[in-house]
Amino acid sequence: MTTTAETAETARTAEAAGTTGGPAAPLTGEMVLAGARVRGRGRTVHAVDPRTGRTLDPGYALGGAEDVDRAATAAAEAFRTYRRTDPGVRAAFLDTTAEILTDRTETIVARVQQETGIPEARVRGELTRTVNQLRLFAGVLREGSAAGVRIEPALPDRTPLPRPDLRQRRVPLGPVAVFGASNFPLAFSVAGGDTAAALAAGCPVVVKAHGSHPGTSELVGLAVTEAAARHGLPAGVFSLVYGEGREVGTALAAHPAVRAVGFTGSRAGGTALMAVAQARPHPIPVYAEMSSTNPVVLLPGALGERGADIGAGFAASLTTSAGQLCTNPGLVLLVEGPGSAEFLDSAADAVRRTPATPMLSPAISSAYRDGVQALREHPAVTELAAGEEDESLAAPGTAHLFTTTATAFAADEALAAEVFGATSLVVRVPDVADLPALLERLEGQLTATVHLSEADTATAADLVPVLEEKVGRLVVNGWPTGVDVGAAIVHGGPFPATSDGRSTSVGTLAIERFQRPVAYQDAPAALLPPELRDGASTPTT
Amino acid sequence: MTTTAETAETARTAEAAGTTGGPAAPLTGEMVLAGARVRGRGRTVHAVDPRTGRTLDPGYALGGAEDVDRAATAAAEAFRTYRRTDPGVRAAFLDTTAEILTDRTETIVARVQQETGIPEARVRGELTRTVNQLRLFAGVLREGSAAGVRIEPALPDRTPLPRPDLRQRRVPLGPVAVFGASNFPLAFSVAGGDTAAALAAGCPVVVKAHGSHPGTSELVGLAVTEAAARHGLPAGVFSLVYGEGREVGTALAAHPAVRAVGFTGSRAGGTALMAVAQARPHPIPVYAEMSSTNPVVLLPGALGERGADIGAGFAASLTTSAGQLCTNPGLVLLVEGPGSAEFLDSAADAVRRTPATPMLSPAISSAYRDGVQALREHPAVTELAAGEEDESLAAPGTAHLFTTTATAFAADEALAAEVFGATSLVVRVPDVADLPALLERLEGQLTATVHLSEADTATAADLVPVLEEKVGRLVVNGWPTGVDVGAAIVHGGPFPATSDGRSTSVGTLAIERFQRPVAYQDAPAALLPPELRDGASTPTT
C-alpha cells in the first residue's frame, strides 16, 4: 500500500473515532480511504446550496492519484477475503448499512436538501428507496440465486466420452469504481445501486464522490465504513475519494486493481471513462448510464378518450424534481387528431402553472438554460408554454414545452438530443403510419412510453418490436419517471442510454454486472465453494 | 440493399440450385450472401492441404466491403422477422442444420481432412460435437429458459406507492459477426458455438470464413442456408463472406447493422476487433477468445502417488491435435520432490515417441517453430525432449518439452506467453509456498488444472481463490483439453484469454452473450411476447 498520502492522515479511523453506529459524526471534509480519514492535498471546494447560492461548510480538499492508488490497493487486498465471505455476511453488511442510514435520517435529509435543493419529501423517499435497495439485495444474497449455480453431475457411462462433473457459479469481478450521480444523491450515489450491487456480488467499492454533494457523500460513506467494521470486514472493502474527474476519475478507471466501473452522469463523462477502460492493458467493463430522452408515444384512441388527462399526467412527470430524472419524458410523439389539442392545452396549462424550482447546481441550471435557448432559437420549433420564473434562485429551473413538426424533427438530429431538465419537445405526427420511421431514427433510450386505448392495440403491437430495439423498459399507459426497484425492472438500454445495454443499474439483476462465471470440473467437495457442494440448498438456474 | 456486387452474382440461390437437403452440391468457391451465391471480386485464393502442400480446388475469390454491406444489410432486414420467430421455429432451424450436416458427413469429413490435416477420427468427433451443440441449443429453446423471464405482478395496494406490473425477458442484440477459428473448422467455425448461440438467441449471423478452410466453410454455410430456407426464414438470417481480415473483417465489425462480434483466434486479431468495435459511433460487444497457456499445477502428494501416470496423461493432452487446442496445457508448475523426476521422465519419453503431425497450415507451423526456437535459445530454458520430425510435411508439427526454474520464470514474462502448438514449459518449483506468487503473475486463462492427492487438499484449497481469479474453468485431476458442451461449462476467462470474461463461448450460457434484458411495465397481454403472458409455461429465473 502506498504511504504517500499518510502525512495528511489524521490517524483516526472511523472506528477509533467512536462513530460506529449512533448519531452521525460532524462532517470533517476528509476522504475515507479504507477506513482511515484522510484530508486531500488538492484545492479545497465547498458545496453550494442551489436555492440560495450560499457556500456550505466544511471545505473538501480534493484528493489525487495517490489517494486513488491507496484506496484501490486496499480494495484489492480486501478483495482476497471479501470475495470469500459467506453471502449471509454480505447480506448483514448491507442490512447494517441500511440500518445506520436509517438511524441518521434527519442528518442526511437536512444535508441533502442543502446540497441539492431537492424537496424534503423527495429526499425522504429517496433515502427509503436507498435503504430498501440495500435490504432487497441482502435478501437476494440470503436466498442464493445471485450465485448463478448450474450443476451437471458426472456421467461416467456416457458414450463416446464420459461426462465429467461440472459445476458453475458466478464469482465477483474484483474492486469496482463507482461514480455517483448528481441527481440521485442517495439512490445513485455513494451507497446507491452500483455500490449495493457490487458489495452484494463480493466486490470492494471505491466511490468517487460527486462534487455537488460532498457532505452527503461523507455521511453515507461513513455509514458504509462503519457497517463494514461492525461485521469485521477488511477496511479496504469501501473507500470514498474526492477529486476532479479528469484526474481522480481517470486514475480510478485506469488503476490496475479496479476491475469494473459503474457511472451515472453525462454522455461526455461516460464515454471518456469507456475510452480509459478500453485503453488499459487489461480492459474492464464500464457500466455508464448517460443520456435518454425517454420518448412518449400518444396514440389516437388514447388521445380521443383522455387527451386532457394524459396532458396533465405528462406535465406532472415532466416537471417532477425539476425534470432532473434519467427517465424524464423529454420527447413526445403526438399523433394529431381528436384529443391532441386537449393534450397540448392541458400540458401547456400545467407547465405554465409550474413554479420555478431550484436545480441541482448552478452548472446544471446554466446548461439547462442553454438547451432551452437553443430550442427557442430553432426556426422549426415553437414554444408552447413556460413555467414560472424565480430569479432569486441561485440555480433556477423553469419548465418549458416546445412543439415541432415530424418533418422538422426528422430533418435535424439535434432535436433528438437530451436537454437535462423540465423541458420537452412535442413532435406533431400527422399519422400513425409515420411513427415507425420516426422511432427508428432515435438512439438508444432507457425507456419508451406508449399511451393507448383498446382501439390502438394493433397500432401499438406494430410499434413494440421497434421500441424493443431502442429501450430497456417499455411503459404502457403510465409514465417513465418512478423506477420500481425489484427483480423484473430494467434500468438500462442500448447506447447511448448506457454504455452496455446488456445490463441494468437498478434491480437485483444488477448484481450480475459485477460477476463472471467459473466452472469447476471434477473438483472434490473440499475445493468447491459451499453453494456448489452436494446437498447445498442454493437455487440453480 | 446494395447492388454493387450483383454483377458478379450467379443468379442462383441455394434453393433454386436444388440443393436444399440431399447430398452436398459441388463446391463453387462462391460466397453465400443472404441465400444468393456471389463470386467475390478480389484475388482468388486456394486452400492448401497441410499434409502435402497441394493446392485444393476450387479457387475462392475474396469479397470486399460491398459484400459485407450486402450481407449485413440483409441481416438487419432479416432481424425484423427473425427476432420475433417462435423459439420452436428457431429450434427446428438448428435441428435441420444439424440434420443436413449429418447427412453430408462423408463429404464434410473428407474436405476438413484435406484442408486442415486433422485426423479422420477427430474430424468425425468434431462434427458430432457441432451437431450435438446445435441440438442442445434447440433443446434449450424448446424448454424456454433462454428467455430469462422474470415476472413481478402489480401490487396496487403497496405503500407508499403501488407496484406496477413488471415483466422482464431477454431480447436478441441484432446481427452478429462471427469469425471462425482455424483449429476447430467445424465446432468453432461457420456453424460452431457462436453461430449456434446467436441463431438461438434470435440474431442473424454473418460469418467471415477462415481462410484456411474455405471449402469446409462453403459446405457448412450452405447447410445453414438450406435449413433457413426449409423453415421459411428470411435468407438474410445467414451469410458467409470470404475476405482479408483487415478489409472484410474490419468492415464487418464496423458495419452499423452489426450488433455483436464473436471471434476465436489470435490475440492480435481479437484486440484489433475490440478496437474497431469501440471506435464505432455505437460501440458493440466483442467476444474474442484469444490466448491461453492453461497452467497445470502438480502438487507433491499427487506426484508421489502417480508421477509417471500424470506425465503420460499430460503428454497425451499436450500432443493431441498437434497441440492446436485453445485449452492445450502449455505451462506446468511442477513442485519438486518425490515423483517429480518420474513425471518428467514419463512426459519426456512420451513426447519423444510422438510422431510428427501436420499442423493446420504452413503459417501456423512456421509461427510454432519460431516459438519453439525462441525457447531453445532462451538462456534459462532447457529442452527436455523433442518428438519425431517429418520434413515431408508441408506444415510439420513436432512436440517439444522444455523446463526452467521458478526464478527464471518469474523474471521474464515472455516465458508465460502462449506458443500455439504441442510445446509446454515445465517450471520447477522448489516449494508449494512459491505457487501463489507464481500464479498471481499469470494473465487470464481459459483453464487451470490441479493434480492433487488427499494429502494436498489444504494446499490446493489455498490455491483455489488465486486460480478462480485467473480462469474460466478449474480442472481437478484431469486435463483441460476436451471441453464438454453443456449447461455448466465455462469456456472463457479474464483478459487476454478472452476479451470479456463475463461470458462463455461454449455451452448453453453462451446464448446470453447475444441478448439483453427488456422490461415491460403494465403492458396488456396483446403487447406482451408470448413467454411473458399470464399462464405461459416459460420457466422463470
Image (cartoon, coloured by chain):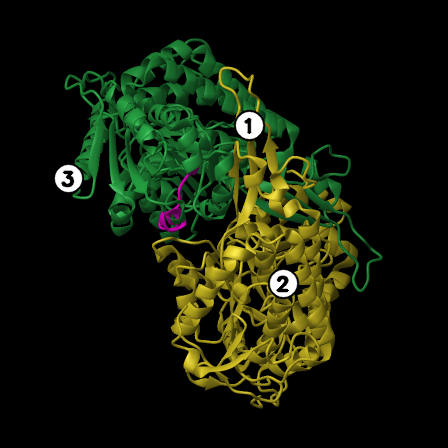
Chain colours: A green, B yellow
Q: Residue at x 54, y 47 (%)?
A: B171
Q: CA–CA distance between discs 1 and 2?
A: 40 Å
Cβ–Cβ below 8 Å for labels 1 and 2?
Answer: no
Answer few, some or many: residues within 10 Å of disc 2's Cα (few below 14, many 20 plus, some between 14 and 19). Answer: many
Answer few, some or many: residues within 10 Å of disc 1's Cα (few below 14, many 20 plus, some between 14 and 19). Answer: many
Q: Give the x, y percent position of residue A14.
A: 42, 18
Q: Amino acid at mark 3?
A: Glu
| Residue holding disc 1 | A137
| Residue holding disc 2 | B329
Quarter-wise, where is residue B98 in the image?
A: bottom right
Q: What span is colored magenta in the figure?
A: A434-449
Vertical position of residue B229 compared to residue A328: above or below:
below
Q: Give the x, y percent position of residue A59.
A: 24, 20
Quarter-wise, where is residue B365 in the image?
A: bottom right
Marks 1 and 3, the one that precedes in the sequence: 1
Q: Quadrant of the C terminus of chain A?
A: top right
Tell me the mark number nearer the camera, choosing from 1 and 2: 1
Q: CA–CA distance between discs 1 and 3?
A: 47 Å
Q: Is residue A356 left or right of residue A310?
A: left
Q: Is residue B169 left or right of residue B108?
A: left
User: Residue A377, labelled with which disc?
Assistant: 3
Q: Is residue A444 magenta?
A: yes
Q: Residue at x 44, y 47 (%)?
A: A284
